[in-house]
Image (cartoon, grey):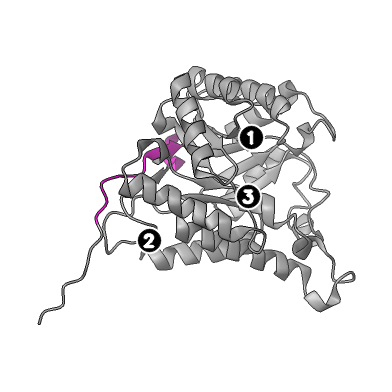
């Protein structure tokens, strides 16, 4: 008897979304099968990797990371150019830590000038991340969207509290990509996507951040939520969930005790840098295999490892 391989066909398809402009622009999404299931159908565009930089010196980062960027970390433009040339990620994520009202509280106008300078000095697509203070981010993203007009930047992220201002400025007036951020809940993700669409932002200009966590920190709930979202988008052809997914892995994995505890504090845990890389890699790999289309990482070795992981699974 001849063996006939079973093929799972879905009626739905993930939207294809373009980030950036020019020869280094990239696309994410486009698949009509589960992640890396090339034996079932079209896996679309390969998953993408971005690298995180800050608008200020990374005081809280571990010593080895600060050493890597010691010559450029005080200047976000030089930092971005260095990352682009040295590590060649798919995109750069500029995180405005200095705009946090509980910190330096940089003005939205100052941040907009920084974002504009970075966007004009790199060829890679740019993702801009805010402060996680929804009120401040609302104004921040409006100013940034205006300053980087024409660069097709990704604004990370619009939440229920500020999606109207972020969506109107970012996705409608200046035609950037808007990331809809929800808290690890399929119904909340769907609801926010619908609200942003009703505002007037087209689905092809929306990406989802459905919530992220480091492995070991409620991670199984993140994985099961993304799995449900992908099955609904593909199997039920639910168009309100067919946006590609971007997840800021580095924001989570470098903030937990296993990464920030020094070797003096926890000698039994081993090398601090290796711990952080291990957590970042294991989290990113797991998220990619369940449905993330793009991940944001911090350590160059993590980027190298995940790039190899993606190559092996898409070969």
Q: Which residue is mark 1?
A: 118
Residue depicted at x 62% and y 36%: 128
Eyeballing the image, is 1 above or below 201?
below
Q: Which mark, residue 83?
A: 3
Residue depicted at x 47% and y 32%: 193
Closer-to-camera residue (161/69): 161
Q: Quadrant of residue 214?
A: bottom right
Residue 42 within the segment the image draws in magenta: no
Residue depicted at x 45% and y 24%: 201
Q: CA distance from mark 3 to mark 1?
A: 12 Å
Eyeballing the image, is 134 above or below 215?
above
Q: Earlier in the sequence, mark 3 or mark 2?
A: 2
Q: Which residue is mark 2?
A: 36
What span is in magenta? 9-26
Tell me, yes or no, whether the two marked residues, 3 and 1, touch with CB atoms within 8 Å.
no
The secondary structure type at the circle numbered 2 is loop
């Amino acid at each position: 008897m001849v063996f006939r391989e079973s093929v799972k066909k879905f009626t739905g398809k993930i939207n294809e979304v373009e980030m950036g402009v020019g020869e280094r622009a990239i696309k994410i999404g486009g698949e009509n099968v589960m992640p890396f299931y090339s034996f079932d159908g079209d896996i679309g565009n390969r998953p993408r990797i971005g690298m995180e930089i800050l608008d200020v010196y990374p005081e809280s980062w571990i010593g080895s990371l600060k050493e890597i960027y010691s010559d450029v970390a005080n200047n976000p433009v030089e930092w971005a150019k260095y990352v682009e040339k040295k590590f060649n990620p798919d995109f750069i994520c500029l995180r405005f830590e200095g705009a946090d009202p509980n910190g330096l509280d940089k003005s939205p106008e100052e941040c907009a000038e920084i974002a504009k300078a970075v966007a004009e000095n790199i060829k890679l697509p740019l993702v801009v991340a805010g402060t996680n203070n929804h009120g401040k981010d609302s104004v921040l993203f409006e100013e940034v969207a205006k300053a980087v007009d024409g660069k097709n930047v990704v604004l990370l992220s619009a939440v229920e509290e500020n999606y109207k201002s972020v969506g109107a400025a970012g996705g409608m007036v200046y035609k950037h990509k808007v990331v809809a951020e929800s808290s690890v809940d399929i119904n909340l993700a769907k609801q926010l996507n619908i609200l942003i669409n009703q505002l007037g932002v087209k689905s092809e200009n929306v990406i989802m951040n459905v919530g992220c966590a480091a492995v070991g920190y409620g991670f199984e709930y993140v994985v099961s939520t993304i799995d449900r979202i992908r099955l609904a988008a593909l199997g039920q052809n639910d168009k309100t969930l067919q946006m590609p997914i971007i997840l800021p892995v580095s924001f989570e994995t470098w903030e937990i005790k296993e990464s920030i505890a020094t070797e003096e504090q926890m000698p039994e845990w081993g090398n601090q840098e290796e711990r952080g890389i291990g957590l970042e890699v294991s989290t990113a790999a797991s998220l990619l295999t369940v449905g993330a289309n793009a991940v944001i990482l911090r350590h160059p070795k993590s980027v190298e490892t995940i790039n190899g992981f993606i190559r092996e699974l898409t070969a």
